[in-house]
Amino acid sequence: MNSFAQIQKRAQHEWSSLQQDAFPVIYVGMGSCGIASGASQVWEQANKFIKEEGINAKLIKVGCIGPCYLEPLLDIQKPGLPRMSFNNVDGQKTTRILSEFLNGNETQLKPIGHFGIPGEKIEGIKSIWDLSMLANQERIVLRNCGIIDPENINHYISRDGFQGLINAFTMGPEKVIDEVKKSGLRGRGGAGFPTGLKWQFCRESKPCSPEGKGSEKYLICNADEGDPGAFMIRSLMEGDPYALLEGMIIAAYAIGAQNGYIYIRAEYPLAIHRLKLAISRMEKMGLLGGNILGSGFDFEIILKEGAGAFVCGEETALIRSIEGHRGMPRSRPPFPAKSGLNGQPTNINNVETLATVPKILNKGSDWYASIGTKTSKGTKTFALVGKIRRTGLIEVPMGTTLREIIFDIGGGTMKKFKAVQTGGPSGGCLSEEFLDLPIDYESLNKAGSIMGSGGLIVMDEDTCMVDVAKYFLKFTSMESCGKCVPCRIGTSRILEILEKITEGKAIEADLNLLEDLSSTVKDGSLCGLGQTAPNPVLTTLKYFKDEYLEHVNNNHCPAAVCRDLVEYRVIKDKCTGCQRCVAVCPTGAITGPRSEPHYLDLEKCIKCRACYEICRFDAIAGDAIEIV
């Protein structure tokens, strides 16, 4: 470990030189969200500009810092000045920003903030941490995302990287487990099982020697993020892969495993690339492989690319997939800690759980336990998406209310707030009465939802809750592995009833059947997929029963979403003739001269809803139609 001190010294020198060298440093947000928004063009334009202008500058890629609605992000740090951040940059803006900033005309530009001490003022420019979306966060697992180059191990080391691992080797496996137990860290994959206790069970399990198989233990990282709209762990792996790998080594050391797997969906090519690069560099530096840091502990990591089956988020189905079988869950017990991969004791944690561990081992369990609530310690990352002004990746202390997240951090909704779904397709839809509900495992479970891996989908008054339930049941019914009858048949029958309701073919008695069937599927399914699949239905039935009754009794969708129950018309006294609806109508169903009320031809209307969505004056109405 003495040699690591030299590595640290070199890393800290490289990092400090970025802040102090006599040449500018340009940072481009190159996470998947940034790239999708055009960051590659920003990168290419910046590279082209500094070459053509002969500027001695460094160009660095960073991961997603969180506010995806501001992407692409471009930061510049000139010698002696803080790092300034610019949002929604394109190729043309890149040239202007670099030209003005690097030639000393930075006062002509308006950055969104600078990277410095939170609250620090620089000539009237706020710190980026004062931005509404970032100000109310507490970053532990995301502390490096958007700050460091995720492909440069020295950047990670310079910010206390691998210090937690060194402390772990000093403490010994039992004390590591005790420290994690004292911290109160619970699994961030959804169930919230105490992490230290899970490690203890696996450490105490004795490997067996079945015929043809070795006698060993395994550590598996579940990076199979399958929830629609969720991108927490993808962004974490893209922005700070070394934190995950350090956490895996600590966990493996604690349970006594020498082989580890990262089960990651193949749809995450950037995360896979950066993880492979990180593993290779750690192996070369003696941080992974044999005799890590001279400790006598050996550990290797293999990436297993999954095909994207949602059910493989369930740990026993994930294990079968790694073994080369079809991903299908099995009954428990025995639990994986007793008999998992190849019949051996296996510990499975998700990405966020493992990436949190190094910080706990570095700063101590008391520090971590001081954050959050009595039963839910620390912080939680969320993907904040839907009908909300500020979309992106956030990290907040456990116990933060939904109101704080949606309105203070997310900026609220454009139209009246209606609901928020926590926990992805397995979670529940919570109404306005739950806005002051603290985000923790027990509170969400009591409300009929779950924490899940961290998806938060915000909905406004233009959302049909019956349609939302139908959407998620369609997803879970397709993703069911089919092994158990309640899930295989039950989710399909639930979906059929929801389709009847949205088509105006249901009766009120169908709502009772829908609730009974959902409860049966929840109670009788083999694994977590089936056990939680009815949550969107049960919660929308409970908190939005009036919408179901409006569909069934009046053949009307209040949100004007369900095509079979709505026809659109122009409200003449509200229409200003702006022609925005004319421009988006794909069939030419809307006509009329500018500045005069328009006309909507029902025979041409395909009910695509485009006019309804784009109208700024509420001049498009969705009326109930008579079902024959």
Image (cartoon, helix red, strand yellow):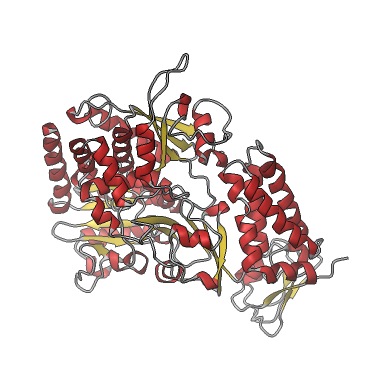
Q: Residue at x 17, y 47 (%)?
A: 15
Q: Residue at x 43, y 34 (%)?
A: 337
Left or right relative to 548: residue 164: left
Is residue 167 shown above or below 410?
above
Is residue 503 shown to the viewer in this render? no
Is residue 241 shown above or below 611?
above
User: Which quarter of the rendering shows the C terminus?
Assistant: bottom right
Q: Residue furthest bottom?
A: 573
Left or right relative to 177: residue 425: right
Residue 446 location in percent, x, y? 52, 62
Which of the 4 image quadrants contains residue 538? Answer: bottom right
Is residue 384 shown above or below 306?
below
Question: Closest to the observer: 431 or 525?
Answer: 525
Is residue 14 shown to the viewer in this render? yes
Residue 536 location in percent, x, y? 61, 57
Residue 246 location in percent, x, y? 29, 39
User: Which quarter of the rendering shows the N terminus?
Assistant: top left
Question: Closest to the observer: 608 or 409?
Answer: 409
Left or right relative to 610: residue 67: left
